[in-house]
Image (cartoon, helix red, strand yellow):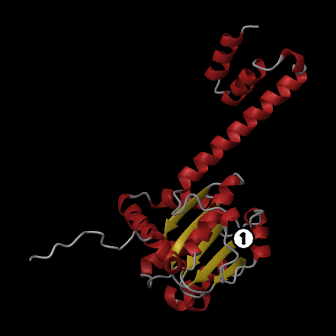
Amino acid sequence: MLTHPTLDQMAALGLTGMADAWKALAEQDPGQALERNEWLGLMLDREAAARADKRFANRLRNAKMRFPNACIEDVDFAASRGLDRRQILALAQGDWIRAREQIILTGQTGTGKTWLACAFGHQAARLDHSVSYVRMPRLFEDMAMARIDGRFPRLVDKLARLQLLVLDDWGTHGLTDQQRLDLLELFEERYQRRSTILAAQLPVSGWHAMIGQPTIADAILDRIVHNAHRIELNGDSMRRKDRKATLTSAENTETIRTET
């Protein structure tokens, strides 16, 4: 059997999963040899798994999340934050993304909103959805620059195509007239087409006043609030709890000499 030419062909075609399976099967004990159909099935399974892993890695890299290693399996339900285990695990199934719904995460600083938003983003990438994370101040900067250099329609189109958009630091400051219009255009393009996660310190009850102009505020909130799963995080800052564990030793081990 021409092992090396076959492996070369697989490599040339980008069939790395099949090549790995081929090499493993070739090293198998002849007494345990698989039938031809079993060989083919195993190689195809390995190739499919390799492509899924590569696609997931690419989606995770392109998402540029604040906490790329955050995942649902590591959610701390023991901490007193008001998390509903059943709700979190149900949302991890991804049906809300397929239904084009939203998630709203609110709570005081340090309660884990951003980390949990990234965990949902990680899970979405695992489920083969396109994801992107962006902080609201950075989003407004990008939109303003895109208007100057003529890229604004392309930017909105790019954001509109994302199956999940994670917007962090929502409502940290009031909006200008142009920012209101930009947000309205973005959410209009995504409404009932794609899903969004919004993480905010400001309670939902304060969003209307934060947006400002009543008519535009009504239009924006109508597109993101009424079909959203709400998660309110309570309790003390998780950063404060971890502070002692992460700080380096403050002890001064230097020997102080005294003059005699």
Quadrant where the N terminus is found in the figure: top right
Expressed as whole percent of the image width and height from the top left, the position of residue 231 reads 68, 80
Res 10 → quadrant: top right
Q: Residue at x 73, y 39 (%)?
A: 49
145 in relation to 228, above or below: above
Res 24 → quadrant: top right
Expressed as whole percent of the image width and height from the top left, the position of residue 180 reads 49, 79
Left or right: 171 as drawn, with respect to 60 = left
Query: Which residue corresponds to mark 1?
Result: 101
Q: Please indicate, yes or no, whether residue 34 appears anywhere in the rendered image.
A: yes
250 in relation to 42, above or below: below
Expressed as whole percent of the image width and height from the top left, the position of residue 218 reads 60, 86
Q: Residue at x 59, y 71 (%)?
A: 187
Q: Front-most of 72 and 105? A: 72
Q: Residue at x 34, y 73 (%)?
A: 251
Q: Residue at x 67, y 74 (%)?
A: 103
Mark 1 is on which residue type?
Answer: Glu
Direction front: furthest residue = 260
Q: Front-most of 89 and 94? A: 89
Q: Please indicate, yes or no, whether residue 186 appears anywhere in the rendered image.
A: no
Q: Front-most of 124 and 252? A: 252
SS state under label 1: loop
153 in relation to 177, above or below: above
